[in-house]
């Protein structure tokens, strides 16, 4: 049977980007998290349904996990793993060994790199994927060309213009960005425990980390991994150490 000729079908995806830590302070760990989904309407509907079920109107933040809300956070995370074809990619930077000269340019480059990494290694091989990216808004100077620099980085690494658009929004308005916050926060927390930065882990945060490990079927979050689950969920962690 002859292989199909012509371009691959186009697939439009929704992506959500958030970070943990800062590049311009003394925190050792900086992390970026990216969720990409072709089923965003289904995922969004389930996340809103969960909020309604518990009448939970606050923002989800990994730093805000307590004994009073840990149940909500566990169910919140579970919705990501229930919705088929979701991908989560975490990239962890150890600032003790990663050289960063210009924090602003480095941040934009790192954001472009994580999206390009998804497109080059995790996206479908049978379609040509294009992403509309929603990123957590951060206060930046007027001369910061966040969107242009990310698009330039992605085009350089993927050799095509793979981004439909980039929109920055405040995280309280986008539940899916909050989902990225919780996931990347948990991964970074695991690394901080492993490195001895956190000597006495918070009980509830540790419980949430273990819940994510169980959902992903992995023994730890503080390691490089690429996990494919039965409903085509992809859960990937990468380390940048130089």
Image (spheres, rainbow, N blue to C red):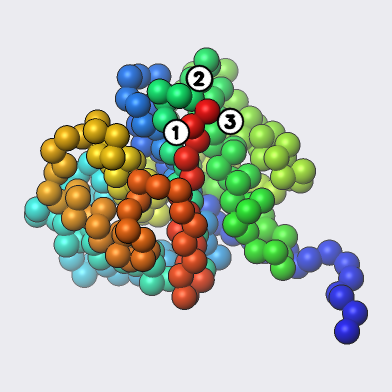
Marks 2 and 3, how far apart at CA: 11 Å
Give the x, y percent position of residue 49: 30, 69
* Front label number (3 vs 1): 1
Tell me whether the residue at label 1 lies in contact with that at label 2, contact meaning CB atoms closer than 8 angstroms. no
Marks 3 and 1, how far apart at CA: 13 Å
Labelled disc at residue 100:
2
Q: Earlier in the sequence, mark 2 or mark 3?
A: 2
Q: Earlier in the sequence, mark 1 or mark 2?
A: 1
- What residue did someone put label 1 on? 93
For label 3, the crowd category at 10 Å Cα-Cα, with few meaning under 14, some 14 to 19 and many 20 or more, is: some
- Helix, strand or loop under label 2: loop
Which of these two is toward me, 153 or 48?
153
Tell me whether the residue at label 3 lies in contact with that at label 1, contact meaning CB atoms closer than 8 angstroms. no
Residue located at (35% from left, 26% from top): 28
Residue located at (46% from left, 53% from top): 225
- What residue did someone put label 3 on? 109
Tell me whether the residue at label 2 lies in contact with that at label 3, contact meaning CB atoms closer than 8 angstroms. no
Q: Residue furthest bottom?
A: 1
* Front label number (2 vs 3): 2
Q: Residue furthest left?
A: 68
For label 1, the crowd category at 10 Å Cα-Cα, with few meaning under 14, some 14 to 19 and many 20 or more, is: many
Give the x, y percent position of residue 5: 89, 71
For label 2, the crowd category at 10 Å Cα-Cα, with few meaning under 14, some 14 to 19 and many 20 or more, is: some
Q: Can see residue 104?
A: no
Q: Residue furthest top?
A: 101
Labelled disc at residue 20:
none
Determine which quarter of the picture holds residue 11: bottom right
In this picture, residue 214 sits left or right of residue 15: left
- Helix, strand or loop under label 1: strand
- Helix, strand or loop under label 3: helix
Which of these two is toward me, 228 or 20?
228
Residue located at (60% from left, 57% from top): 122
């Amino acid at each position: 049977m002859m292989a199909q000729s012509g371009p691959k079908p186009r697939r439009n995806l929704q992506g959500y980007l958030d970070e943990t830590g800062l590049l311009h302070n003394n925190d050792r760990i900086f992390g970026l998290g990216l969720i990409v989904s072709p089923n965003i309407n289904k995922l969004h509907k389930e996340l809103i349904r969960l909020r309604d079920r518990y009448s939970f109107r606050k923002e989800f933040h990994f730093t805000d996990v307590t004994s009073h809300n840990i149940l909500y956070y566990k169910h919140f995370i579970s919705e990501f793993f229930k919705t088929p074809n979701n991908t989560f990619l975490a990239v962890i930077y150890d600032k003790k060994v990663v050289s960063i000269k210009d924090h602003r340019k480095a941040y934009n480059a790192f954001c472009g790199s994580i999206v390009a990494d998804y497109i080059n290694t995790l996206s479908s091989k049978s379609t040509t994927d294009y992403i509309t990216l929603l990123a957590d808004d951060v206060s930046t100077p007027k001369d910061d060309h966040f969107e242009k620099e990310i698009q330039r980085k992605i085009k350089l690494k993927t050799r095509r213009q793979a981004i439909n658009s980039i929109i920055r929004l405040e995280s309280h308005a986008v539940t899916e960005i909050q989902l990225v916050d919780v996931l990347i926060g948990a991964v970074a927390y695991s690394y901080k425990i492993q490195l001895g930065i956190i000597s006495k882990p918070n009980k509830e945060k540790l419980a949430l980390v273990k819940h994510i490990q169980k959902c992903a079927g992995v023994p730890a979050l503080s390691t490089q991994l690429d996990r494919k689950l039965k409903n085509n969920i992809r859960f990937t962690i990468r380390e940048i150490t130089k």
